[in-house]
């Protein structure tokens, strides 16, 4: 992987394909490897850049680990690559980073795809408090291997998902305990809910029926955006890019107005266009 020497951190990333730049941002505890089912498809149409955010993957362990810092790192990476404007796809925490980038510099973001994410990670509901507390305590007390096994079972519960569960466990057990805990502390302070009107670019909100949050939250999120589409996949969980990559990729290419190369199975629960 190429490496960018940025202020305070060495950021590893992949850079492939040709055409308009497309940035892929991963979630907490993950890395650019989680886009393994998307990159081969998307590089047929775009120049795809997928960084390991600081503290994750091959990037150096150097705080702080806040959404704002992750966004600043990615802007610095894009500057080194000579990219002034791009499309962004963010999954989970990567969606938070994408939104932070877009509210900071909306003129530099052509469009957004926000998968399995919300505009606020603040622990302001009992469900969010339980989710963050359980993750925090499990990592703090039992360590990354136990947390990885628990997460893998929830993300990929079907018998045919055995290989995906094994992949998640193998990768996520390498997480640094302190980095993960400090990331959670940063996440629960983050929100752009009051700035959603700045996201006037086309936005594609993608959610799963069995995500960590109810589908109604995804619908309310899309409704609050000036120019959004919403798609909710039935019988799917929080890791859509890995669980149903063919359907996910086809939805991406349709949003980008690019001919699809894969055929999705019938798994769409809701497909709505807002305004």
Image (spheres, rainbow, N blue to C red):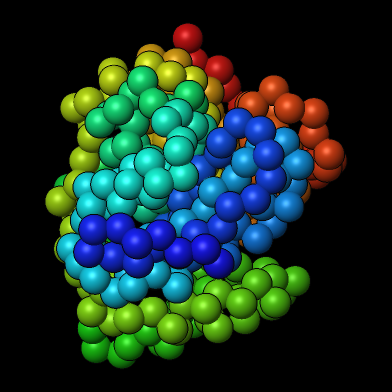
| x and y, in percent, of residue 180 in the image | 29, 72
Furthest toward the top, the residue is 275
User: Residue visible at 74% across and 47% down?
Assistant: 41
Specify whether 266 is left or right of 269. right
Number of on-image labels: 0
Q: Nearer the viewer, residue 14 or 170?
A: 14
**In the rendered image, the vertical position of residue 75 relative to residue 163, given as above or below:** above
**In the rendered image, the vertical position of residue 78 relative to residue 210, given as above or below:** above
Camera sees residue 3: yes
**In the rendered image, the vertical position of residue 134 relative to residue 189, given as above or below:** below
| x and y, in percent, of residue 86 in the image | 49, 32
Q: Quadrant of the N terminus?
A: bottom right
**Quadrant in the picture for residue 37:** bottom right
User: Residue visible at 45% across and 71% down?
Assistant: 57
Camera sees residue 89: no
Specify whether 11 is left or right of 125. right
| x and y, in percent, of residue 218 in the image | 42, 35
| x and y, in percent, of residue 217 in the image | 37, 37
**Quadrant in the picture for residue 226:** top left
User: Residue visible at 22% across and 64% down?
Assistant: 8
Specify whether 171 is left or right of 121. right
User: Residue visible at 40% across and 59% down?
Assistant: 4
């Amino acid at each position: 992987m190429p490496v960018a020497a940025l202020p305070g951190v060495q950021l590893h990333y992949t850079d492939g394909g040709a055409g308009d730049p497309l940035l892929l941002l991963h979630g907490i505890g993950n890395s650019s490897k989680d886009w393994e089912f998307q990159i081969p498809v998307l590089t047929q149409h775009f120049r795809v850049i997928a960084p390991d955010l600081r503290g994750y993957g091959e990037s150096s362990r150097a705080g702080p680990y806040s959404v704002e810092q992750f966004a600043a790192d990615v802007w610095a990476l894009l500057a080194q690559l000579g990219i002034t404007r791009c499309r962004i796809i963010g999954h989970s925490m990567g969606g938070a980073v994408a939104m932070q980038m877009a509210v900071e510099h909306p003129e530099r973001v052509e469009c957004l795809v926000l998968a399995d994410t919300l505009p606020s990670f603040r622990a302001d509901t009992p469900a969010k408090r339980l989710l963050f507390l359980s993750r925090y305590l499990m990592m703090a007390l039992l360590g990354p291997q136990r947390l990885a096994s628990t997460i893998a079972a929830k993300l990929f519960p079907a018998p045919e998902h055995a290989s995906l569960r094994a992949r998640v466990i193998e990768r996520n057990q390498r997480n640094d305990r302190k980095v993960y805990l400090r990331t959670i502390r940063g996440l629960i302070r983050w929100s752009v809910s009051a700035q959603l009107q700045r996201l006037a670019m086309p936005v594609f909100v993608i959610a799963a029926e069995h995500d960590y949050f109810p589908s109604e939250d995804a619908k309310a999120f899309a409704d609050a955006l000036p120019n959004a589409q919403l798609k909710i996949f039935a019988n799917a969980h929080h890791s859509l890019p890995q669980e149903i990559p063919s359907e996910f990729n086809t939805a991406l290419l349709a949003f980008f107005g690019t001919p699809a190369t894969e055929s999705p199975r019938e798994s769409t629960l809701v497909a709505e266009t807002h305004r």
